[in-house]
């Protein structure tokens, strides 16, 4: 088989073999650290009470930490502070001229921005660790369950030191993988944290089948749907809108340059998974605040309306994803700058005048593709959540809710009753990281005149 031959080719190349083994070794170190508990916490009591945090900011951290937060290990914060710091600096690049100048200085400027990202990661990790420690002590006092063995200032300082150090170590692991391994280190760490829950998901589905809640045809339908979703993700993530660009002929010294036709590729999903993370983070803020004040009935009612599957949550989630698609693309893609650079190098789009007309043409295409990409991200994100918790349209007020409750099937309104592991965000990350990693291995094999995993062309990567 071609895949087995490609794997053998990987181990035939000494440098590629060392990079692969180095990557796997550091990922194994990351998983070993997932079994080291944070001092002073009753992990069993925490696991019993964690279900109420599933839709909060803490639940989002747990997903990106690979379940480490649920067990409150030293890697409980995961890579989430680094992701947040990177997003913040990307946003500040637009409004802070100093960072914009650094970004244009090339490799030296990028190193400086990376250094600022590290500092901000440490600060955010310390703040999040403090919030987690305070929340655990507050919940321990409110529920009567001893989540914290010895509450007080000493516990807060120990938790901050432990979790912040764990985040710094994970950040170092990710950078080492990026420099000396294969693929993007940060993305691979998230990937490893997500796929490690696959055996638990398989066990859970098998338990439902053994208990009689699920029949064999239900499992087959679920697997078929998941495979179809993965196929759609692979197809869309590689989809591009190619804008033809013609370069005029010009004489440089004694050489004739230009005159070639090329393409400007614009991806359908230019923003990657970032808009989904933005929208999820914003929707978890009110739920997290409500979890800190469980006695407030207004916050409790707001939490109920913003739960998974509720119509208000679904509406805000879809609108938030589409909005952040446009917002993020406007930051990373500047049609005016693109048009100016094309004009400087003698490039033009056939049938479109250079300058402002080129910028407007590219902006129109980008706007349409971004809308399609937002709809695609919204569907991929909410379909798994609907399968988990259902579409609660019967909670609509008045006659609309009564009509839906009477005429719609219960499995559609209340879900399938199984917490299968891969949600929308997780699935996007897993498939995207896998495509990028295979793409890099494919490039290494092709460069050394070995056959890779594919027979026709290369796998297009994606932005994560």
Image (cartoon, rainbow, N blue to C red):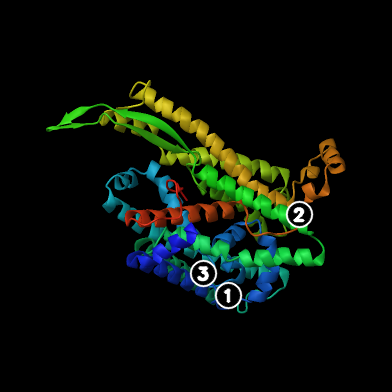
Please tell me which residue is depicted at 58% across the width and 78% down the height of the picture.
40
The residue carrying mark 1 is 152
Counting residues from the N terminus, which is met first, the one under dot 3 or under dot 1?
A: 3
Residue at the far front in the pictured view: 1
Percent position of residue 377, x then y: 58, 44
Q: Which mark is residue 416?
A: 2
Mark 1 or mark 2: which is in front? 2
82 to the left or right of 144: left
Residue at the far left in the pictured view: 254
Percent position of residue 86, x then y: 43, 53
Location of residue 314 (image quadrant) = top right
Neighbour tally class for label 1: few under 14, some 14-19, many 20 plus, Cα within 10 Å: few
Please tell me which residue is depicted at 79% across the width and 60% down the height of the picture.
214
Counting residues from the N terminus, which is met first, the one under dot 3 or under dot 2?
A: 3
Mark 3 or mark 1: which is in front? 3
351 over 1 or under it: above or below: above
């Amino acid at each position: 088989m071609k895949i087995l031959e490609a794997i053998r080719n990987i181990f035939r190349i000494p440098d590629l073999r060392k990079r692969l083994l180095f990557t796997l070794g550091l990922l194994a170190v990351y998983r070993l650290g997932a079994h080291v508990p944070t001092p002073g916490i009753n992990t069993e009591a925490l696991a019993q009470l964690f279900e109420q945090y599933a839709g909060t900011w803490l639940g989002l951290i747990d997903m990106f930490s690979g379940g480490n937060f649920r067990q409150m290990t030293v890697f409980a914060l995961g890579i989430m502070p680094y992701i947040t710091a990177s997003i913040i600096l990307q946003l500040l690049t637009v409004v802070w001229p100093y960072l914009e100048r650094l970004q244009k200085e090339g490799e030296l400027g990028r190193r400086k921005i990376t250094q600022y990202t590290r500092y901000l990661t440490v600060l955010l990790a310390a703040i999040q660790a403090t919030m987690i420690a305070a929340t655990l002590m507050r919940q321990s006092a409110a529920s009567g369950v001893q989540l914290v063995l010895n509450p007080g200032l000493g516990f807060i300082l120990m938790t901050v030191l432990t979790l912040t150090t764990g985040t710094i170590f994970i950040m170092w692991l990710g950078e080492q993988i990026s420099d000396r391994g294969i693929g993007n280190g940060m993305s691979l760490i998230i990937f490893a944290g997500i796929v490690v829950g696959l055996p638990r998901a398989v066990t859970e589905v098998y338990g439902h089948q053994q208990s009689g809640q699920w029949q064999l045809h239900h499992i087959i339908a679920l697997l078929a749907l998941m495979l179809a979703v993965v196929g759609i993700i692979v197809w869309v993530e590689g989809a591009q809108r190619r804008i033809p660009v013609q370069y005029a002929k010009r004489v440089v010294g004694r050489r004739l340059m230009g005159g070639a036709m090329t393409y400007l590729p614009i991806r359908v999903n230019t923003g990657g998974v970032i808009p989904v993370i933005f929208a999820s983070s914003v929707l978890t803020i009110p739920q997290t605040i409500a979890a800190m004040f469980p006695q407030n009935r207004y916050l409790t009612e707001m939490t109920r309306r913003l739960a998974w599957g509720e119509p208000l949550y679904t509406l805000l989630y879809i609108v938030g994803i589409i909005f952040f698609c446009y917002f993020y693309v406007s930051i990373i893609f500047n049609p005016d700058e693109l048009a100016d650079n094309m004009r400087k190098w003698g490039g033009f789009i056939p049938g479109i005048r250079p300058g402002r007309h080129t910028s407007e043409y590219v902006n129109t295409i980008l706007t349409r593709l971004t809308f399609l990409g937002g709809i695609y991200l919204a569907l991929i994100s909410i379909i798994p959540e609907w399968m988990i918790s259902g579409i609660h349209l019967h909670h609509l007020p008045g006659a609309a809710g009564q009509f839906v409750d009477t005429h719609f099937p219960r499995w559609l309104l209340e879900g399938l009753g199984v917490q299968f592991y891969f949600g929308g965000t997780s699935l996007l990350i897993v498939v995207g990281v896998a495509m990028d990693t295979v793409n890099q291995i494919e490039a290494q094999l092709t460069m050394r005149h070995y056959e890779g995993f594919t027979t026709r062309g290369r796998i297009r990567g994606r932005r994560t």
